[in-house]
Image (cartoon, rainbow, N blue to C red):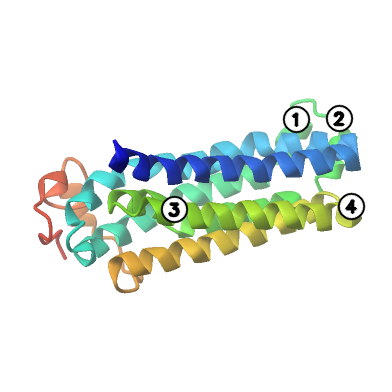
Amino acid sequence: MIALLRGAVPLFVAMVTGMVGSVVVTSVLGKHDTVTLAAFAVMIAVVNPATAAVQGALRGLGPFVAPHREEPAAAVPIVRDARWLSLATGAVGALAVLCVPLLAGATGVPDEVVRELGLLPYFLAVSVMVFASTGGTSTILIALGRNPHVLWASLTAGVLLSVLAVVLVPPLGLTGVGLAWLVSGTAAAIVSVFNQRRAFGRAVGWAWPRVGEIVGHPGGLGRRGPGVRAGGDPGR
């Protein structure tokens, strides 16, 4: 029971921290201007599914990483492959975010709300790509049993987003939200990558996807898949 709580509590706190940041942004925008808040709601309706798509695409990564808890470095080739999937999904999501002004206008959103968007779609599209560049770090850390490390990235993002929103929204409106979102997301990504490097004992780096390994296994991402023994070779 204690072991279960140790694993679950950091994830719960991380989730709550992320929600707090969004609540602060919404509250600040509500006091700033109702049209600005409406424009933000239109953006979030697309941004949230875009980031959720990146997370969802990498949910299956966990079973391929978990067998390597005793020797995490053996999972590095698998993580490199997953990064390409993350970036591809993130690129589609970022494109959808950039198209929000066009889609909003075509679906009957009032012109004043569409005009209020300004540079926000660009900031949030870059933010989606920054998130995608981490390659499912949270899933990887959880699979390696490093649940507490997930909290630090979420805490960094939540605190920075809250503070920057309070500081930047009054003078800059939605541009301030975009800056706050991008800066907090970038900081969280840096923390995530740092924790991942500590977990693996080395930098993951980049490499071309191992197409043969991915296509050759019915589960993808590695020849031996979830059944590989701890510390086994996931394929080169």
| Residue drawn where x is 55% and y is 45% of the image | 93
Q: Quadrant of the C terminus?
A: bottom left
Residue hosting label 2: 110
Q: Position of residue 216 (x, y in %)?
A: 15, 48
Chain-order first, disc 2 or disc 4: 2
**Real-space Cα distance between discs 3 and 2?**
40 Å
User: Quick one: label 3 or label 4, which is nearer the N terminus?
Assistant: 3
Amino acid identity at mark 1: Ala
Q: Nearer the viewer, mark 3 or mark 4?
A: 3
- State the residue lying farthest toward the top: 108
The span from disc 1 to disc 3 (Cα, nearest Å) is 39 Å
| 73 to 161, vertically: above or below | below
Q: Secondary structure at mark 1?
A: helix
Q: CA distance from mark 1 to mark 2?
A: 10 Å
Residue 68 appears in the rendering: yes
Asked if disc 1 and disc 3 are in contact, CB closer than 8 Å, the reply is no
**Mark 4 secondary-structure assignment:** helix
The disc at residue 170 is 4
Location of the N terminus by quadrant is top left
Q: Position of residue 150 (x, y in %)?
A: 44, 53
Which numbered disc flags the more N-terminal residue, 4 or 1?
1
Distance, label 4 to label 1, CA atoms, is 29 Å
42 over 69 or under it: above or below = above
- Residue 64's x, y, as percent? 22, 49
Which residue extends farthest front? 2
Q: Residue drawn 51% across and 57% down? A: 153
Residue type, numbered disc 2: Pro
Query: Mark 1 sits on what residue?
Result: 106
The amino acid type of the residue labelled 4 equals: Pro
Q: Can residue 136 be seen here? A: no
Q: Residues within 10 Å of mark 2 (few under 14, many from 20)?
A: some
Pointer 3 or 2: first along the chain: 2
